[in-house]
């Protein structure tokens, strides 16, 4: 997935999670969620795969600290199903790309 698109999706998910769970001022993120977003952007910038990067859940290299990995999982578990309501095209694109990637990885594993 393209780096900018991935950051866009993660930003939307973190904003949704923060708005519903932490109730910050309108349009802002709480300190915890802002730190998570900054961490995600930093890790994404340093990814050795570049734009050929698989989704983190499918990646063999786990570059997140365990605490941050668990936090982003929590955010995605909450925001993933809900993002369909506000951003259906982004959600659909993410679903299709994820399935295609999973199939590609299965083919590579079976070789």
Image: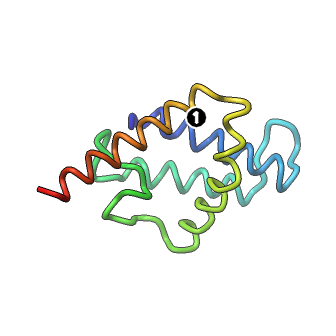
Counting from the top left corner in percent of width and height, residue 86 is at 72, 30
Which residue corresponds to the image point at 62% horizontal and 57% vertical from the top-left?
Answer: 36
Residue 12 to residue 77: above or below: above
Question: Dot 1 corresponds to which residue?
Answer: 91
Which residue corresponds to the image point at 35% horizontal and 58% vertical from the top-left?
Answer: 59
In the rendered structure, the answer to whether residue 98 lies left or right of residue 76 reads left
Name the colour scheme: rainbow
Counting from the top left corner in percent of width and height, residue 89 is at 58, 25
Crowding near pointer 1: few (<14 within 10 Å), some, many (20+)? some
In the rendered structure, the answer to whether residue 26 lies left or right of residue 59 reads right
Residue 71 position by quadrant: bottom right
Which residue corresponds to the image point at 65% horizontal and 44% vertical from the top-left?
Answer: 13
Quarter holding the C terminus?
bottom left
In the rendered structure, the answer to whether residue 92 lies left or right of residue 75 reads left
Quarter holding the N terminus?
top left
Residue 8 to residue 30: above or below: above
Secondary structure beneath dot 1 equals helix
Nearest to the observer: residue 68 or residue 45? 68
Counting from the top left corner in percent of width and height, residue 85 is at 73, 32
Residue placed furthest toward the top:
89
Residue placed furthest toward the bottom:
66
Residue 100 position by quadrant: top left
Nearest to the observer: residue 48 or residue 94? 94
Nearest to the observer: residue 38 or residue 109? 109
Which residue corresponds to the image point at 72% horizontal and 42% vertical from the top-left?
Answer: 82
Residue 62 position by quadrant: bottom left
């Amino acid at each position: 997935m393209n780096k900018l698109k991935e950051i866009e999706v993660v930003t939307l998910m973190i904003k949704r999670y923060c708005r519903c769970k932490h109730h910050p001022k309108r349009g802002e993120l709480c300190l915890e969620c802002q730190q998570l977003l900054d961490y995600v952007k930093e890790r994404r910038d340093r990814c050795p795969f570049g734009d050929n990067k698989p989704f983190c859940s499918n990646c063999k290299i786990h570059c997140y600290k365990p605490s941050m990995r668990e936090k982003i999982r929590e955010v995605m578990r909450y925001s993933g199903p809900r993002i369909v309501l506000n951003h259906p095209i982004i959600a659909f694109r993410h679903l299709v790309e994820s399935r295609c990637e999973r199939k590609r990885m299965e083919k590579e594993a079976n070789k």
